[in-house]
Image (cartoon, helix red, strand yellow):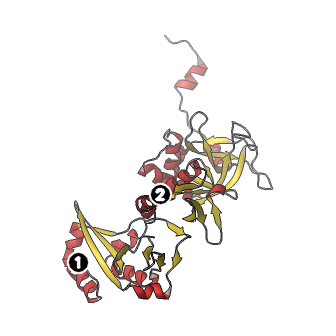
Amino acid sequence: MLPMDEQMFQRELLPQLPSKLDELAALETDKKQILVIGKHRYYNHLVFSLMEAEITQTGKIKNPVTPVDAMQLIWKAEKPLDIKFYTAISSFQNNYNEDYNAAELEALKLIVKNPIELDVYYHDREIAETISAKSLIPVKLNTLSAEIQLSVFKKDPFYEITGELLFNDSSVPFRNVVIRNEYFVYNNNTFSFIDHPDMLRVIKFFKANNEILLIHSSKYEGFMQQILSTLEERIHINYSYIQKATKVQLEEKSFHTERVIYLRQQENYIGITPVMKYGQVEVPVYSRKQIFDTDQNGNPFKIERNDALEARFTSLVMQMHPDFEEQMDGYQYFYLHRDKFLDDQWFLNAFEVWRNEGIII
């Protein structure tokens, strides 16, 4: 026989229907959701958090700042992009890796896009270990829109190599570049996500080596061929000690141009690489590689690439298949699955167009 415990019966037996008015009241809160960038208290990995707080009339956040469970918001979200955003936030709250795989990098890109346009704050642990209005700094969040340029200076008996980030209207030398939370350049209160691992690798390498590389002249030729030449596939390198070719130097040698397409099969995929040939030198049109030669006196000079001709060549290849437009970034070649390559005799039609344009296959 159970003892007569009215509170126990109410708690464990009677229906516990939530109040609809309470739910509606909770939705009508004056609190605003924000996105917080920080680092784990005990580990060094990147953490994103959703928080909420009331906002003052001047737009500043007020204490208390309370956490929001991203997992709970997934079930309430209706737009697929919002669902992915909350899922990405949740994954970074439970991720203890410092080096991210491809899927984690895609999640990071989605967070940076910030599809629900939350205000973004940086948790400064030097101000306080706990998240509060005082320790949150308002920041902007975007993807880094800049290119890397390395410059090589000849300073006997060394070659000095420095780097900088090139923006549309300015440049920032590597010595002034601040890396925050491993994957972001921090500048003017803005966290800019470095979305290409190779670009991040170059910046981190120079930051770890006092922003300057000194190569002895006896080692430089090998370094140029093995390292700089490969880097130049992706980034621009300014060889300050090599001048543009003069008319006389160009007349000494023939640098007529030819357009070539190389085909390469790997497993079930066909790679299609457009290459411009300048005299005896070949360069993939996507490469940043520069063309050098020496005159009869042994003086090196630089030959300007024909950007307009290369752009028309690239366009001629790209327009032959709708998949190629999505492959414009990140590779030196286009590619197709073997089935698409052979589909409806696509390659026969493409080859005919290219050969009629004087392109060598």
Q: Position of residue 33 (x, y in %)?
A: 65, 50
Q: Quick check: 313 above or below 184?
A: below
Q: From the viewer's perspective, is 81 left or right of 130?
A: left
Element under disc 1: helix
Specify the quadrant that holds the C terminus: bottom left
Q: Is residue 79 visible?
A: no
**In this figure, what is the number of numbered marks?**
2
Residue drawn at x 60%, y 20% as measured from the top left: 6
Q: Position of residue 30 (x, y in %)?
A: 71, 50
Residue drawn at x 20%, y 73% as measured from the top left: 343
Outermost right residue = 58
According to the image, label 2 marks what residue? 218
Residue drawn at x 48%, y 77% as measured from the top left: 301
Of label 2 and label 1, which has the lower sequence position?
2
Q: Residues within 10 Å of mark 1 (few under 14, many from 20)?
A: some
Q: Position of residue 244 (x, y in %)?
A: 52, 79
Q: Residues within 10 Å of mark 2 (few under 14, many from 20)?
A: few
Q: Nearer the viewer, residue 131 or 73?
A: 131
The numbered dot on residue 346 is 1
- Give the quarter of the image for residue 10: top right
The kind of residue tagged 1 is Trp
